[in-house]
Image (cartoon, rainbow, N blue to C red):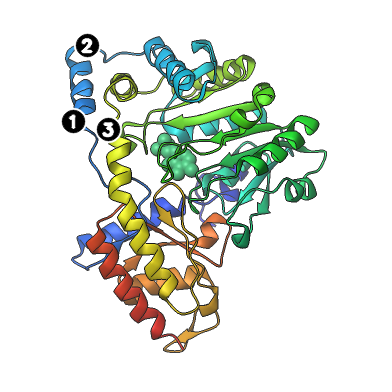
Amino acid sequence: MSAGISLAQRVAQIAPSPTLSINAKAKSLKAQGVDVLNFSVGEPDFPTPPHICQAGKQAIDQGHTRYTASNGIVELRQAVCERYRKRQGFSYDPEQIQITSGGKQGLYNIFQAVINPGDEVLIPAPYWVSYPSMTQLASGVPVTVPLKEEKHFDIDAADLARYATDRTRMLVLNSPSNPTGAIFSAQALQEVARLALERGWLIISDDIYEELVYADEPAAHILAVAPELKEQVILANGVSKTYSMTGWRIGWCAGPLHLIKAMNKIQSQSISNPVAISQYAALTALTGPQDAPREMLAAFLPRRDFFVSALNRLPGVHCENPEGAFYVFPNFSAYYGKSFKGQKIDGSLTLADYFLDEARVASVPGVAFGADDFVRFSFATSLDTIKEGMKRIEVALAALQ
Ligand SMILES: *Cc1c(COP(=O)(O)O)cnc(C)c1O
């Protein structure tokens, strides 16, 4: 090692977010003039709706440019409560809401507030990339529990019970899921709720894609199937995906008062408060016209349908139909062991590299989500891009021997 400042051990345990770094690589190739089709992006391809941008500009003009309460402005916390009451019938007091710098920072606060060294966190895999790292940054131990493709990536209480120990403190649920797009069934959630009640686990429900559901009914939710679990559930959500506001960095958590208060302490000693201007824009997002998610879904649907059927037509490839979010997660393991010009494809990492180098298609290797048989493609991009991308993928796969 060089003679620099030595780093904390916790840094060595984690890697930078792979989705952000692949996106950066694709963007830099594009900047060099390489014709890359970018399917690695984890954000909607629509601008923030104009009335929300207007609210941000107005917030500046009205002088909302100073510190706010650490847990967020009360109007926004009230709007979050009102949203839960109206949409799901969940009842929260504004004191039970923490406004955060994106859903991600809210999740980070939860881990910091709950996990002691050695505490285990059950993380169903495929998982969102940050859950294991957030666990480790809190000195906890991530325990991944594989979900089965043949069961449409539904959660399974019996599997959770097999991986649980007396050090298990927490379970992370994400439905609709990034990366699979799967929605957990009400029945499976009911069984999970029963287990969590019995064991006293805290459940994080990461609901960031709850508005992006293709069926007519909303996704089943752990608190809707088991209201008696309320003291053991913390909800994480935000405006990033629903309103195409990823750069504004506003999210929230809702949960038991003592837990939110602990998270408020952490927040007040770290970020102080989420950006004031963005909080006012988010207030307009929640209380203004609700066309944005509907319009996005209408655009995403034909893309999803094309992508899924084109992938399933490829020999040896299987792709589940995502029920929510904007990702497809096809299984390419039939190609592992094959080679191109003597270079062997031995897993999702080499396959995603091969797609980028030979097909100029940027994707995220499944290994980043704890599922090496798969590769994630985002369909938050135009139908034309998807059609061209599928042609390139087909050619690249056919060239493998
Ligand atoms: C995008 C995302 C988040 C949080 O995004 P923010 O931009 O920080 O609000 C949280 N969970 C999952 C699964 C996501 O995909």
Using the image, determine if residue 37 lies above or below residue 85. Answer: below
Q: Amino acid at mark 1?
A: Pro
The image quarter containing residue 274 is: top left
Left or right? Give the position of 249 relative to 346: left
Is 372 situated above or below 234?
below
Q: What residue would you read off at disc 1? A: 50
Label 2: which secondary element:
loop
Element at label 1: helix
Q: Identify which amino acid the numbered label 2 is placed on.
A: Gly
Q: Which residue is mark 3?
A: 291
Comes first in the chain, label 2 or label 1: 1
Asked which secondary structure carries label 3, the reply is helix
- The quarter of the image holding the N terminus is bottom right
Q: Residues within 10 Å of mark 2 (few under 14, many from 20)?
A: few
Place of residue 318 in the rendered image (x, y in percent of width and height, measured from the top left): 50, 69
Picture coordinates of residue 15, whole percent (x, y): 52, 52
Q: Is residue 395 left or right of residue 55?
A: right
Q: Tell me if residue 29 can be seen.
A: no
Image-quarter location of ligand 1: top left
Q: As rendered, which of 256 and 92 lies closer to the eye? A: 92
Instruction: Identify the residue position indicated by label 2 in the image.
Output: 63
Q: Position of residue 13 (x, y in %)?
A: 60, 49
User: Marks 1 and 3, Cα distance to the nearest angstrom?
Assistant: 12 Å
Front: mark 3 or 2: 3
Q: Quadrant of residue 289?
A: top left
Residue drawn at (57%, 19%) of the image: 260
Task: Count residues near mark 1 (Cα–Cα under 10 Å), then give few for <14, some for 14-19, many for 20+.
Answer: few
The amino acid at mark 3 is: Asp
Determine crowd level at label 3: few under 14, some 14-19, many 20+ residues with C-alpha closer than 10 A: few
N-terminal of the pair, mark 3 or mark 2, is 2
The Cα–Cα distance between marks 3 and 2, rounded to whole angstroms, is 28 Å
